[in-house]
Image: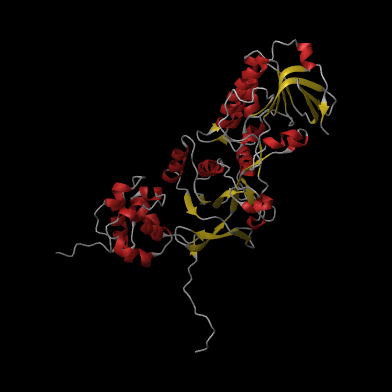
Amino acid sequence: MTEFGYNIHEDLMIDHDRPSPAFEAVLEKVPSISWCIACGSCTGTCICSDQTGSGFRKLVHFLRNGMYDKLKKTLAYCQFCGKCSLVCPRGINTRKAILEMKKYFNLYSNDIA
Amino acid sequence: MYTDCVIIGAGPAGLKAGQLLHSLGHKVCILEKEEIPGGKLNIWYELFPHNESADGILQQMLADINYPIRTSIIIDSISRNSKGFLLRDQNGDEYRSRALLIATGFKPFDARQKEEYGYGIFENVITSVELEKMFKENKITNSKGLVPKRIALIHCVGSRDIKVGSEFCSANCCITGIKQAIELKKMIPDLNIYCLYMDLRLGGRFFEDCYKDSQVHHKIQFIRGRLSETNENADQTIVLRYEDTLAGRPAKLTADMVVLLVGMQPDHSILKLLPDIDERVGSDGFFGNGRIDQADQNSDNDLFFAGSCTGPKSIIQSTDEASEVAFRVNKYLKKRLHTSIQDQYDGVWIQHP
C-alpha cells in the first residue's frame, strides 16, 4: 500500500443539517428532553459513569446529533436507578426518556417468557 | 434658555430623569439629536422579558411630559464654569443650566468588524437591530424575498472579544436572542431556530423563564459553541462552522438567514465636547466608575451620567439608574438654591473646542 505519511481518520464533523428521526420520536413521547441545559449533573451522579463515562447528557447529545452507534452502546450501561432524574435541575423525566430510546432501537424486551 | 438641568438624550434614562426632576420642581430641558424622542426604544419592536410593545412603553413615557424636549439638536459646544454649563447648538440657540445630565446611551456594535461572520458581505447575514425592523414591518424574508426555514442566531457578536476591543459582556444580547427566537417562531411556526452561544447569561428577573419557555414551548435549539466563520452557498444560504463544545467536535450548520446579536458599545460622540470627562471614562469605554457611589460624595459635582452610557443596561435598569441620579441632581440643585438665579449664570465661561 502506498504510504502517504499520514493516516485516514474517521470524519468527526457534526452536521447539524442532518435530521435525527430518533430524537424527534423520543421528543414526541418525552417532551422534557428538549429542556436539557447540558449541566452534567446526571453524569456526575450516575452509578456507572465511573467505569463507563456514560450519563444522560451524553445520551441526549448522541440522540440529537444522530450518533446512534454510540447511543446504543451507552444505553446498555443504564440500570434505571433514576438518580439522574433526582438531580436534574430542569426536571427532565430521564428514566422515561431512556426507556423510550431503548424502545426506539428495539433494545428493550422482556426475555423471560 | 435658562434651566436647572439640561439632559442630553431623550431615551428611557433621559425621559425618566426629566420626568422626576420636573416633578421635583426643577426647570428641565432635554436635547435629542434624532428627530423623535425615545432613543433606542424606537428600534425595538417588543421588549424582553414580557414582550411589551416598545412603542407602547414609549408613549407611556411621553404621556406625562410637560417640559421641553428639543429634537434634531446637534450640540456645537459645551462650556462650563463654577456655576454651571452653557450649551450652544448648531442653530446658535443657547441653553444655560446649573447641572448637566448625560444620558446619551450606547451604540450597537458594528458587525462589519467581525469580517469572518460575513456581515456586509453576504446578504443573508443581518443584525438583531435589522431583525427588529423586520418585526416592525411584520415581514420576515431573506435576500430573495422568501420566508426562511432555518435561522441561526449568533450570540456574543462584539462582546467578550479582545479582537474587536470589547472584552466586556453586553448582558442583554442573550435575552434579546431568546426573545427574538420566540417572536420568530410565533410568526413562522415551522421555522427551525438555532442559537449558537458560549454561555447563556440570563441574569435578569424572568429571563430564565423566557429561556425555558423557548425550549419547552418553542423548541428552539441551543448549540454551545462560538461561531468561527461563515461561507455562502450558490443559493445564498449560509454555512456556519464552529465547534459543538459539548461534543468536543467540529460542526456545521446551513441556515437561510443568520442573525448576529450585536453587543452594546460605548458612544463617545459627547467626549469631543467635554474632553475633561476623560478621567471619568472607564477602561471599558463607558462613563462613570461602575462602583457603588455614595450619594454624599462628590456633592460639588455638577455633571451626571445615567442610562446605558454608564454600561450595558436593559431599559428597566436604565430607568432605575435615571431615577436614582435624578434624586442626586435634585440634591445638588437644592444645595445651590441660596444664590439668586442671575448670580448663578454670571461668571467666566471656559469653552472647549
* Residue B117 position within the rendered picture, expressed as x and y whole percent measured from the top left: 63, 55
* Residue B312 position within the rendered picture, expressed as x and y whole percent measured from the top left: 59, 38
- Left or right of A57: which side holds A7? right
- Tell me if residue B1 comes above or below residue B72 in the rendering: above
Of the 4 image quadrants, the one containing the C terminus of chain B is top right
* Residue at 63% in and 28% down: B13
* Residue at 25% in and 56% down: A80
Q: Quadrant of residue B213?
A: top left
- Left or right of A84: which side holds B106? right
- Left or right of B342: which side holds B121? left
- Foreground residue among B91 and B124: B91
* Residue B102 position within the rendered picture, expressed as x and y whole percent measured from the top left: 69, 29
Of the 4 image quadrants, the one containing the N terminus of chain B is top right
- Tell me if residue B218 comes above or below residue A55 in the rendering: above
Q: Quadrant of residue B330?
A: top right
* Residue at 15% in and 64% down: A112
- Tell me if residue B32 comes above or below residue B226 in the rendering: above
